[in-house]
């Protein structure tokens, strides 16, 4: 038994009330399979008929090409458009190398530009990549006795793919992976560096910050944990860090203090529990404290650290 087959059976056994789970489900009609010459199958299909929702899940345990399944579903969408209540989800373990993981995450952004609902989310974010590798090679009996908690994996797939709330132009989701959080960190730093962005932000008291190791930047965690998506896909837009992928200062300020579901506590719990971030106090490491205080000094007119002190959320490494 591979870890994928174990997960397929476990999702079926642990599906929440109102949901049913099946596996190896064909995405395309027999006619389209014959014409295209390939037959994509979802590792798991979660269905809730009362909500008219279907979540097509692919498990990426350790594969060398984590974007291959994204492409199959995207090509399928070109010939047989994804129904309104359908979502594609890639669940990626920490055994997949970071660069390949980010390739999959950016493929998801492209899928959204095609008008698809698509997400890449963690699989067992609390388990190290080396341990995932071992689990994937265990005999069936030993794997069953590892007591892996499947409930949070199902909950992650359902909650992240459901909007937190919807307004006239956007649907607001939780950020679904580390790359999306990282883009939000960059968006905050770039946004408040403008006159208009600094004016809109004002000065705010912040307790929790996200650190992005690749850019060596910090940002308020509430800003980083959510992702607004336009209701109409902008397939013709040029995709870059400057085209509004992720949270923006203007959108954040337009809903902050108005929408109760846009909540800092929910943001922190999401980053910790669903995306696998770890929480530290910035002064636990002298080197890290210096890095944070140097960043903070640049934004002292915009950020007031809460009297409880600054707490930093860090992504886990493999």
Image (cartoon, grey):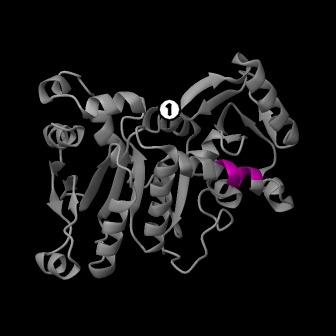
What residue sits 86% from the left and 59% below the top?
195
Residue 261 seen anywhere in this rendered image of the structure: no
The image quadrant of residue 308 is: top right
Residue 198 in picture, x, y percent from top left: 82, 54
The foreground one among 84 and 285 is 285
Q: Is residue 119 left or right of residue 229?
A: left
Residue 228 in picture, x, y percent from top left: 54, 59
Let me know if residue 186 is in the magenta part: yes
Q: Looking at the image, how many numbered discs can be counted on the residues?
A: 1
What residue sits 77% from the left and 23% below the top?
287
Question: Where are the magenta residues, as a range?
Answer: 185-189
Residue 165 seen anywhere in this rendered image of the structure: yes
Q: Is residue 302 left or right of residue 221?
A: right
10 Å crowding of disc 1: few (<14), some (14-19), many (20+)? some
Let me know if residue 132 is in the magenta part: no
For disc 1, the marked residue is 272
Q: Is residue 65 left or right of residue 54?
A: right
The foreground one among 240 and 22 is 240
What secondary structure is the magenta-colored segment mainly? helix
Q: Secondary structure at mark 1?
A: helix
The foreground one among 187 and 287 is 287
Question: Above or below — where is 144 with respect to 172?
Answer: above
What residue sits 33% from the left and 43% below the top?
61
Which quadrant of the figure contains the N terminus? top left
């Amino acid at each position: 038994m591979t870890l994928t087959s174990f997960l397929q059976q476990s999702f079926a056994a642990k599906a929440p009330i109102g949901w049913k789970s099946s596996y190896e489900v064909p995405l395309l009609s027999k006619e389209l399979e014959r014409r295209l010459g390939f037959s994509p199958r979802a590792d798991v299909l979660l269905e809730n008929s009362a909500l008219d929702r279907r979540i097509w899940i692919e498990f990426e345990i350790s594969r060398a090409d984590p974007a291959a399944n994204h492409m199959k579903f995207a090509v399928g969408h070109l010939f047989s458009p994804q129904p309104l209540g359908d979502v594609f989800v890639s669940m990626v373990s920490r055994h997949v190398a970071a660069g390949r993981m980010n390739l999959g995450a950016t493929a998801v952004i492209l899928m959204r530009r095609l008008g698809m609902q698509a997400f890449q989310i963690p699989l067992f974010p609390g388990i190290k990549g080396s341990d995932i590798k071992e689990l994937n090679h265990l005999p069936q009996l030993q794997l069953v006795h590892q007591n892996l908690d499947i409930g949070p994996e199902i909950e992650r797939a359902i909650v992240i793919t459901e909007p937190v709330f919807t307004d006239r132009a956007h649907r607001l989701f939780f950020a679904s992976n580390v790359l999306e959080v990282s883009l939000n960190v960059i968006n905050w730093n770039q946004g408040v560096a403008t006159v208009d962005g600094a004016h809109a932000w004002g000065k705010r008291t912040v307790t929790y910050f996200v650190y992005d190791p690749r850019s060596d930047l910090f940002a308020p965690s509430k800003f980083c944990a959510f992702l607004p998506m336009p209701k109409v896909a902008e397939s013709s837009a040029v995709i870059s860090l400057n085209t509004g992928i992720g949270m923006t200062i203007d959108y954040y300020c337009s809903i902050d203090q108005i929408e109760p579901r846009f909540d800092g506590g929910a943001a922190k719990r999401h980053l910790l529990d669903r995306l696998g971030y770890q929480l530290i106090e910035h002064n636990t490491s002298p080197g890290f404290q210096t890095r944070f205080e140097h960043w903070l000094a640049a934004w002292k007119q915009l950020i007031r650290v809460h009297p409880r002190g600054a707490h930093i959320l860090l992504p886990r490494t493999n």
